[in-house]
Amino acid sequence: MAIKKATFAAGCFWGVEAKYQKVKGVLQTEVGYMGGRTESPTYRDVCTDRTGHAEVVQVTFDDSVVNYQELLDIFWRCHDPTQKNRQGPDVGNQYRTAIFYHDEEQRKKAEASKSDLDGSQMFPRPIATVLEKAGTFWRAEEYHQKYFQKKGLDSCHI
């Protein structure tokens, strides 16, 4: 078993987490915050749009079952990567589209994947997704973890 981590920001973390929970080879998902300047941010802090954090899903996966490229493919399909600082009705820097890479291999794969998607002209606008080196992952409050599962939902009704 080759256990690795991947971290993605694609709008509200609830729906993104639900997508990754269903993937064979994903061992764990956690929602939280990354990419900001405030220590130990809370949801309330992040919602002020002043901490610089994005809502993220950190995925722990077995690379021998599901590889990073497959996780990237899910990321691109589960949101609109052309929207800067928003997804649907959610607006603010905390809802930005970002890939937080954990090593050089992930950075290179994410860059290539983004470039390929941008070149495909699948979207009418350029890809707005930013690549950032993964920093400290601040785990969100417990009521945010596995939110849809706790509520008996499969996705947002938006």
Image (cartoon, rainbow, N blue to C red):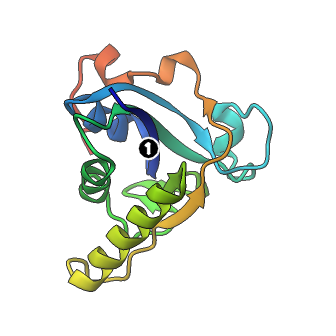
Residue 29: x and y in percent read 40, 28
For the residue labelled by badge 1, is the local secondary structure a helix, a strand or a loop? Answer: loop
Residue 27: x and y in percent read 33, 23
Could you tell whether 84 is left or right of 152 in the image?
right
Q: Residue most toward the front?
A: 1
Front-lying residue, 149 or 136: 136
Q: Amino acid at mark 1?
A: Cys
Front-lying residue, 77 or 147: 77
Residue drawn 60% across the image and 49% down it: 134
Residue drawn 45% across the image and 56% down it: 106
Residue drawn 25% across the image and 30% down it: 25
Q: Is residue 2 visible?
A: yes
**Image quadrant in which the N terminus is located:** top left
Q: Quadrant of residue 44?
A: top right
Residue drawn 44% across the image and 44% down it: 12
Q: Is residue 97 visible?
A: no
Residue 103: x and y in percent read 54, 52
**Image quadrant in which the C terminus is located:** top left
Residue 132: x and y in percent read 59, 60
Q: Is residue 110 above or below residue 54?
A: below
Q: Is residue 10 above or below residue 139?
A: below
Q: Is residue 117 above or below residue 18?
A: below
Could you tell whether 8 is left or right of 157 in the image?
right
Q: Quadrant of residue 39?
A: top right
Front-lying residue, 8 or 90: 8
Report crowding for label 1: few under 14, some 14 to 19, many 20 or more residues within 10 A (C-alpha): many
Where is mark 1, residue-wise? Answer: 12
Front-lying residue, 22 or 51: 22
